[in-house]
Amino acid sequence: MSYYDANRDRFLEGLKAFLRIPSISTLPEHQPDIRRAAEFVRDELQQAGLDGVELIEGPGNPLVYGEWLGAPGKPTLLLYGHYDVQPPDPLEEWKSPPFEPEIRGDNIYARGACDDKGQTYILIKAVEGFLKTEGKLPVNVRFLIEGEEEYGGKHIEAYVASKPARLQADAAVICDTEMFAPGLPTLCVGLRGIVYLELEVRGAGHDLHSGVYGGVAPNPIQAIAEILTALKDRDGHILIPGFYDRVRPPSPEERAAWARLPFNEEEYKSKEMEVSELVGEPEIPVLERVWARPTLEVHGIRGGFTGEGAKTVIPARATAKISMRLVADQSPQEALEQFRAAVQKVRPRGVSAEVRLIHGAAPSLVNPANPFIQASAKAMSEVFGKETVYIRSGGSIPIVGAFNQHLGIPSVLMGFGLPDDNLHAPNEKFHLPNFFRGIEAMARYFRLLGEQ
Ligand code: BES
Ligand code: ZN
């Protein structure tokens, strides 16, 4: 029996302990939990047998580092994951509490089960298996696990930019994406970037009686609605001047490969999303819309009266949280400038508008012909017993662009999540067979790279 088979129960207990820590990076009151999660990862790396294990303190949540560099002449992999999670709300929709992991059927349910504690744990346990049984790895590894991915924190990027020599590697390996379908080994070769911002609109100097002043007073919430509808038409085309100029269309081969994927639009709509109709650019196929086209979305509007009952007020100010997802070759800086200019152009009379950047990250695209991607595809195919497919994803993993920019390395996105894992939503889960196969696939990958 292999080490991985013999230790399944222990791995599950360890994962549960990790999942019990509510390490929500965007809520300041969870700072002690962030530290506990970082220390948990540190202890796991230590226990797995890595060298130089430490918490790296800096402007933000701690990074966790550990290395094993005992394979001279073999490739070095930078293994990345994140120990922070999204907030669990709305709590009442969870069937079991978000930070009390529960196994039901083949799945473990908890916030972070898939994104990204379960997947980070895959990397740790794959390495542990080699060190505990053979005392060595077929490749060199450096772990760099962060705790601010879910809110776009900049600690890791600052560290990567300042310490390229310490992080020297040939490729990064990230388990933080999804497989296209259950049982279908998948490599993700493209991620969208993001610009997340806050739009503040001000009208009168103070709130006004809507009867006394209604008809002459500018209304900032109405203005936000008008700005939004002027920036995107009803068919999902973004009307910001110049916005699409740098969008690189997928190649004909990539389009053809996407068309061959087992995609059922009816199920996608009715089961996965529970919507009656898909929206967005009608002339563009669905997968291309989510993988290779930029977006403009409003996440929330704050302002005026939202309590129980009624209050007749014209608010003096309102704010909106807005993001744009970007695709290659758009840049976050340019998109932000274009957004700012467009807002000033369409801003209605009588209000001022200010745009503040909250965070931004570049889109990324890797060439599937890269040997590190090819070896990964082979390992995945061997373990899952099927040909590996190449997809992109509409989500963002900000560090991928930074690894490319500052370390000059590609990222191998070996994801083991499933489309119905409910990332960022109630009842997040991780498919346990994928957890164990993920560990196996990662071990196989290390072995293949060591043999090359
Ligand atoms: N793991 C996700 C990104 C992801 C999800 C990639 C599904 C591929 C498939 C990641 O943790 C995430 O959610 N990132 C944020 C980043 C943002 C806050 C900067 C995102 O995409 O919203
Ligand atoms: Zn994630």
Image (cartoon, rainbow, N blue to C red):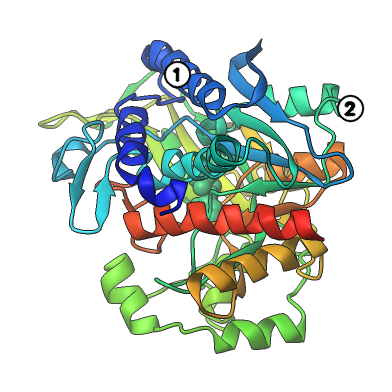
Frontmost of labels 2 and 1 is: 2
Find residue 407 and report its image quarter: top right
Q: What residue type is labelled 2?
A: Ala
- Report the residue at 53% width, 83% height from top: 261
Find residue 388 and report its image quarter: bottom right
Q: Is residue 162 left or right of residue 109?
A: right
- Report the residue at 87% width, 44% height from top: 408
Crowding at dot 2, Cα within 10 Å, few <14 / some 14-19 / many 20+, comes out as: few
Labelled disc at residue 165: 2
**Nearest to N terminus: mark 2 or mark 1:** 1
Q: Secondary structure beneath disc 2?
A: loop
Q: What residue type is labelled 1?
A: Ile
Of residues 10 and 124, the one nearer the viewer is: 10
Labelled disc at residue 34: 1
> Looking at the picture, how far across and down is residue 68, in whole percent?
71, 31
Crowding at dot 1, Cα within 10 Å, few <14 / some 14-19 / many 20+, comes out as: many
Q: In this view, does 182 lie to the left or right of 353?
A: left
- Relative height, residue 230 to residue 161 (above, below): below
> Looking at the picture, how far across and down is residue 98, in whole percent?
24, 36
> Looking at the picture, how far across and down is residue 257, in whole percent?
64, 84
Q: Quadrant of the C terminus?
A: bottom right
Distance between the Cα atoms at labels 2 and 1?
27 Å
Find residue 284 and report its image quarter: bottom right
Of residues 384 and 257, the one nearer the viewer is: 384
Q: Secondary structure beneath disc 1?
A: helix
- Report the residue at 55% width, 40% height from top: 133
As drawn, the residue found furthest toward the left would be: 309
